[in-house]
Each structure stands twice: as structure tokens, then as C-alpha cells.
Amino acid sequence: MAEAEDRLPSASEDAKKEALTRQELADIVDLSLWAGQLLMQNGAESLRIEETIHRLGTALGCDWMDIFVSSNDIAVTTISGLDFRTKIRRVVGVGVNMTIVSGVSRLSRRVERGELNRIQVRAELERIALAEHHYPRWLTILMVGLACAAFSRLFGGDWAIFGVTFVAASLALIVRQELTKRHFNAVLITVATAFVAGLLASSAIWVSASPQTALAASVLLLVPGVPLITAAEDIITGHLVVGLARGFFGTLITLAIALGLLLAVNLTGVGGL
Amino acid sequence: MSLVWLLLHDALWSAVAALGFAILFNVPIRTLPACALGGALGHITRTFCIELGLSITSATFFGATVVGFFGHFAARRWQAPSTVFTVPGVIPMVPGSLAFQTMMDLIRISETGPGVDSAMLASAAINALRTGLILGGLAVGVIAPRLIFYRRQSIF
């Protein structure tokens, strides 16, 4: 990893590369944007997007790549000799899929080692983009419910709270998955999911003296951990605008969770949050 | 003895939490055990620091630094980008309930109107500040290995 990332194209190395045709430059722009789009849509931070695109493009024969990562789009310029081509792609829709991030990252390393040409890179990107999730849906629901229940233990909840949180969080994830499938707005989905989680977790009032723990833990599956962490990473690495945009999105989602919970608590009358 | 028990309790549940989020984030199957391990390592570091008397902010920073370095070495060992290990690893430390508390404070202030007392305002400000500082600490900790090892990267 270290030796690969230390490798910067020097003047002498540039001279060894053959000049690419306009057609080839256009092809590399396309592949780079596709790779960048996959990274951006699946939770990679800006520095990783830039590094990976740069590595991919220079390994495919470009002298240099200029990459502009914004909050909703990526622009790439491929440069070879005196010729260059630029293209912008709009990137919408955010989720987290680490297998795709990992796949694109490893692909760029393989290209760097000279294992793949442009045609093979296109086929690989297609394979990465279309791959099925590793984990069946029931397992994801079960494990996310368990994760939120684990949080209730970390917050000091007892076993009754654990059970209520597990059920509330699992059902909340089903609600979120169903709404996401129907392409509702992300903020709206969060409000609705938090509302459902809040209603279900309120039933803890019958089994425990501190139902607040169940309420707080059962919405943790919604906490925008990835936007907030990548926001802070982006800001530290100098990608201020992307970082601020992501941070604001994370704040908005947090507000949406609070709103959904508040609606539920007002209905059920579980106080003290 | 009770400290050992506390740390074990902590390690178990934070590993389960990290594992759940790792599955939600669809990490490659071969990296799953490492993701759970990272979550446990980070969280017990944080709990240990809090037991030593550190503030939650600096304790979180140390916990995230452990996750960051763990991710750095796990990336080589399991051939995947460090994000795969660090993101599920720090999720148990994301100040979710603090951020949520801040939002609740803000809503409460707006509902109370002009008669709002200073305790309510202070609570909102303190919670917001803590949330921001903890998040900052998390991020700096996670990218600490990057900041230390790959300084030449900043050419972009």
C-alpha cells in the first residue's frame, strides 16, 4: 500500500508514456467517472475518491488526472501530452456499500500493477456495480436489531429493554427498506422510520421503569454515522465544501430522527427524553 | 475485578453493534471478524480512558485512534480499504444520543418561546458543543494513521 501511494509520476516517467488518442482519453474519463460515482454513492470519503481515480487514470496511460469532487457531482480531466478531455457527472443517491468501495479500490491497484486493460476494467466495474449483497435480508434485519439492542446494553438497559429494542429496531429497518424501495425522500423516510421505532419502543413503559433507553437505542440504526464521519474527514483533509454539505445532511437526518421520535412520544405519552 | 468485568461487557456489546453495522454496510465477508474486533478495541479503549478520569471527548479521540491504527493494519492483512474496518468500528462511539438530545433541546426551546430559561439554553449549547467535539475527535482519530504515514498525499 505504502509504496504504491508514494509513487508520483516524475518528469522522466511521463516521457515514457505514449501519447493517447482523443478517443482513448474519452474512454478513460468515462471509466474514471464510473469508478468515482460508485465510490461516492457508497460512502467513500473525498480523499479516497480522488486517490482512486488518479491511480486508475494514470495507470491506464494518462500523464495526469485532475479531479474535482463536489457534494453532488464529480468532474474529471484526463491529460496526455498536450491533449486533454473533461467530463462532469452528476451523482445522486447515497447509501453505504463497503463491498463496492473495497472492490473499486482493489480494482485500481490491479490496474496499477498492469493486470487489466481498459476493456477488462469496464467489465470489472460492471461486475462490482451489479453484485448482489453478501448478506440476505433477514440476516441484516436480525443483526441490525441485535446491534441496536447491544447499544441499549451499553446505555445500561436491562434484558426487558434489550428485547423491546431488538423488536423495535428490526421492524424499523423493515419500514426503512420498504420506503427506500419506493424511492421516498431520505428525510421523509427517516422521520417515518423514527416514528415507527418510537411507537414500538414506547411499549417498554409496560416492562421497565426507564423506557427512554429503549427509545434512544431503537433509533440508532438511523443515526447518520457515515455522513457525519466522512464530513469530518473531508473537512480535515481540506475538502471543505463537500465536508460542510455532508455535515449539513447528517444534521438534517439527525433532526428528522428527533422529529419522528417527538411525534411518537407525543402520541404515547412516554416522557423524560 | 469490576473494571475487567465492565470492559468485557463493553467489548462484547460493542462488538455486536459493530458487527450489525458491518452487515448493514455490506462489508466483504472475509472482513467481518475484523470489523467486530475493531469495534470492541475502540470502545474498550474509550471506556478504559473514561474510567481513568478522562473526559468523554478525549476518551473518544483515543478510542478512535486505536480503531484508526487497527484499520490501517487490518487493511494490509485482509486486503481491503481501511474504511471498511474503521467505519463500523467507530459507529458504537458516534454520539447519536447526544446529537439527538441537542435536537430535542432545540425543539423544546422553540416550543417554550420568549420565557425560555438559561438552563435550557445552556443544555442545548453544551450538548451541541460536545456532539461536535466528539465527532471531530472521532474523525481525527480515524485518519490519524493517514496524517502520520502518508504526508506526501496532499498534492491533490
Image: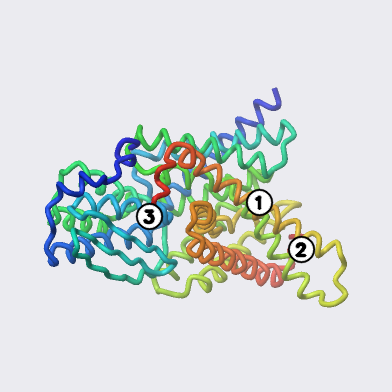
Q: Chain of mark 3?
A: A
Residue A97, labelled with which disc?
Answer: 3
Where, quadrant-wise, is the C terminus of chain A in this rendering?
Answer: bottom right
Residue B119, percent from left and from top: 85, 61
Dot 1, how many residues are within 10 Å of its Cα: few (below 14), some (14-19), or many (20+)?
some
Q: Across the whole image, how many numbered discs are drawn on residues?
A: 3
To which residue does mark 1 refer?
B133
Q: Nearer the viewer, residue B135 or A165?
A: B135
Residue A35, percent from left and from top: 28, 58
Q: Disc 1 to disc 2, how far (Cα)? A: 28 Å
Q: Chain of mark 1?
A: B
Can residue A221 be seen in this snapshot? no
Look at 55% across and 71% down and name the residue there. A192
Say which label, 3 or 2, has the lower sequence index: 3
Query: Mark 1 against mark 3, which lies toward the viewer?
Result: 1
To which residue does mark 2 refer?
A271
Look at 12% across and 53% down and name the residue there. A18
CB contact under 8 Å: marks 1 and 2:
no
Dot 3, how many residues are within 10 Å of its Cα: few (below 14), some (14-19), or many (20+)?
many
Q: Amino acid at mark 1?
A: Leu
Q: Amino acid at mark 3?
A: Asn
Is A43 rendered above or below residue B89?
A: below
CB contact under 8 Å: marks 1 and 3:
no
